[in-house]
Amino acid sequence: MAMIEELVRVSRTGVERRRAEVPLERLEGRLGERPEQRPFGEALVRPGLSVIAEFKRRSPSAGQIRDGAQPGEIARAYEEGGAAAVSVLTDEAHFGGSLADLTEARHACELPVLQKDFIVERYQLYEAAIAGADAILLIVAALEPDVLAGLHAEARGLDLDCLVEVHEESELENALAVDADVIGINNRNLDDMSVDVRTTFELITDVPAGKTVVSESGIADRSVLEELERVGVDAVLIGEALMRADDPAAKVRELTADEESTREHFL
């Protein structure tokens, strides 16, 4: 079984368990509790290359990344370093995350927060909204075109921005078919977990003007960011390089070359 199929299978099993405990109708009744939305999409199109800084404890490819990591502490560091948004892995089985991590990160900073998970059912959209997500990830490889369209439309109806992730040309076509505003190009192949940043350079040429493009995975140094910015990438999603850094705030500043923020930090 390909890794993406396993990830989706586990995600569906988790949804079934949680829905049995808390029916969708109860979640819908709690929508009034959600905090005021922060504009995720707008945060990615400010001048320069924006960084979506990710919190994740572990991953199938890297194993344990940062022992004892606290989402609130890391989110504050990312904000201090100049990140445009925070991404939080909420998948429990493979990444050790939870919706509680997302809520903690959001309370700790003023940045918009992306829930990164394997969303396959509308139930998860309501979970995300109540937990405080400003945006969600929709992975085209994990969804049939009609399901992608339905989830994208319902998420927008719930005022959730969508990062629609693709890895190959056919997936990009499906993302464009639902008129996705923010397109994530994942440099990682979710079948074998290999990473090649050239994926972004190859696919961005087929993205129409007016779309926000996010490059994901395999980005760890400033030279790569400069090349991505040169070809028109608006934002990058970086996780492991930041989570492994002794000083995550300083690492964000280093990657964004934010000299003003660096000076303020040391004054």
Image: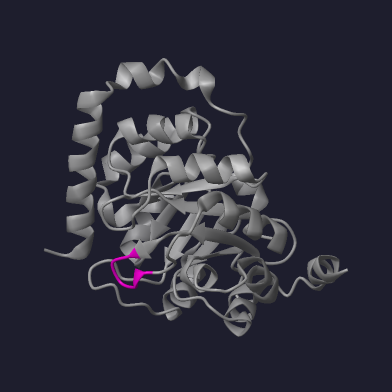
What is the span of residues highlighted in magenta in the rendered image?
A: 59-64
Numbered circles on residues, count: 0
Image quadrant in which you'd find residue 68: bottom left
> As displayed, is residue 167 above or below residue 165?
below
The quadrant in which the N terminus is found is bottom left
Question: Where is residue 246 shown, x and y percent of the image?
Answer: 58, 74
Furthest-bottom residue in this view: 223
Question: Where is residue 147 shown, x and y percent of the image?
Answer: 28, 40
> As displayed, is residue 109 above or below residue 128?
below
Furthest-front residue in this view: 68
Q: How is the image coloured?
A: one colour
The answer to if 257 sits in the magenta stretch is no
Question: Where is residue 78 shown, x and y percent of the image?
Answer: 63, 59
- In the image, taking residue 155 as reference, residue 249 lies left or right, namely right
**Residue closest to the eye, 127 or 250:** 250
- In the image, taking residue 31 as reference, residue 74 lies left or right, namely right
Residue at (60% x, 39% y) in the render:
107
Residue at (30% x, 72% y) in the render:
61
Residue 130 appears in the figure = yes
Image quadrant in which you'd find residue 35: top right
The answer to if 63 sits in the magenta stretch is yes
Question: Where is residue 117 shown, x and y percent of the image?
Answer: 36, 49
**Residue closest to the eye, 10 or 204:** 10
- In the image, taking residue 258 as reference, residue 29 lies left or right, namely left
The quadrant in which the C terminus is found is bottom right
Residue 208 appears in the figure = no
